[in-house]
């Protein structure tokens, strides 16, 4: 069990995921997963009777607490809520996990 890993989630407006992944990699993340999402909030618009919610992307990565803090700081500076990306980050503890590609050696063993 790898208790020192953290699950970092970064929610941004659609179209900014690649920029966020580049930031995460630059700060030490070895990979990320990009999820498509839909915002449900006060900025919904109604056009001709159809409610249009804002399209979002969520970048998810497993990193150490130190790397998570560095990534969040850079996201806050370059893609935070006052930017077009409108990035919001949060971290959750990881209680346990199976192996990841970053934990495997060249032969695919832990």
Image (cartoon, rainbow, N blue to C red):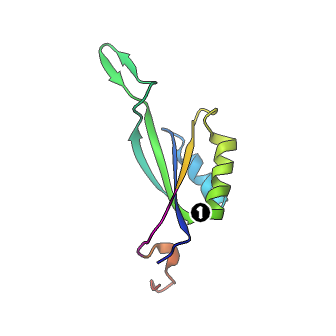
**In front: 18, or 63?**
63
Asked which quadrant contains residue 71, the reply is: bottom right
Q: In the displayed structure, would residue 13 be above or below residue 29?
A: above
Instruction: Compare residues 21 and 72 and report the one nearer the observer.
Output: 72
Q: Position of residue 58 (x, y in %)?
A: 47, 47
Q: Residue at x 54, y 50 (%)?
A: 90
Tell me which segment is drawn in magenta: 92-98
Quick one: 81 or 106, which is closer to the camera? 81
Instruction: Find numbered disc 1 in the image and state the secondary structure of the residue it sits on.
Output: loop
Percent position of residue 59, x then y: 50, 51
User: Which residue sits at x=59%, y=32%?
Assistant: 84
Task: Using the image, determine if residue 3 lies above or below residue 70.
Answer: below
Q: Is residue 85 left or right of residue 43?
A: right
Residue 69 visible in rendering: yes
Taking the magenta stretch, the answer to whether it contains residue 32 is no
Answer with left or right where residue 108 lies relative to residue 10. left
Q: Residue furthest left?
A: 49
Structural crowding at the residue carrying mark 1, measured as other residues with C-alpha within 10 Å and reported as few (<14), some (14–19) or many (≥20)? some
Q: Position of residue 48 (x, y in %)?
A: 31, 13
User: In this image, 65 relative to 60: left or right?
Assistant: right
Q: Residue at x 47, y 73 (%)?
A: 101
Residue highlighted by disc 1 = 29
Q: Is residue 6 left or right of residue 109?
A: right
Residue 31 visible to an observer of this rendering: no
Q: Extreme top residue here?
A: 48
Q: Residue 43 at what x, y percent from top left? A: 46, 24
């Amino acid at each position: 069990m790898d208790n020192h890993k953290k699950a970092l989630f970064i929610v941004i407006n659609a179209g900014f995921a690649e920029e966020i992944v580049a930031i995460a990699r630059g700060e030490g993340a070895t990979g990320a997963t990009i999820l498509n999402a839909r915002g449900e909030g006060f900025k919904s618009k109604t056009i001709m009777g159809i409610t249009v919610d804002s399209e979002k992307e969520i970048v998810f990565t497993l990193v150490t607490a130190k790397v998570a803090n560095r990534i969040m700081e850079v996201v806050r500076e370059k893609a935070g809520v006052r930017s077009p990306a409108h990035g919001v980050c949060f971290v959750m503890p990881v209680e346990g996990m199976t192996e990841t590609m970053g934990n495997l050696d060249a032969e695919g063993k832990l």
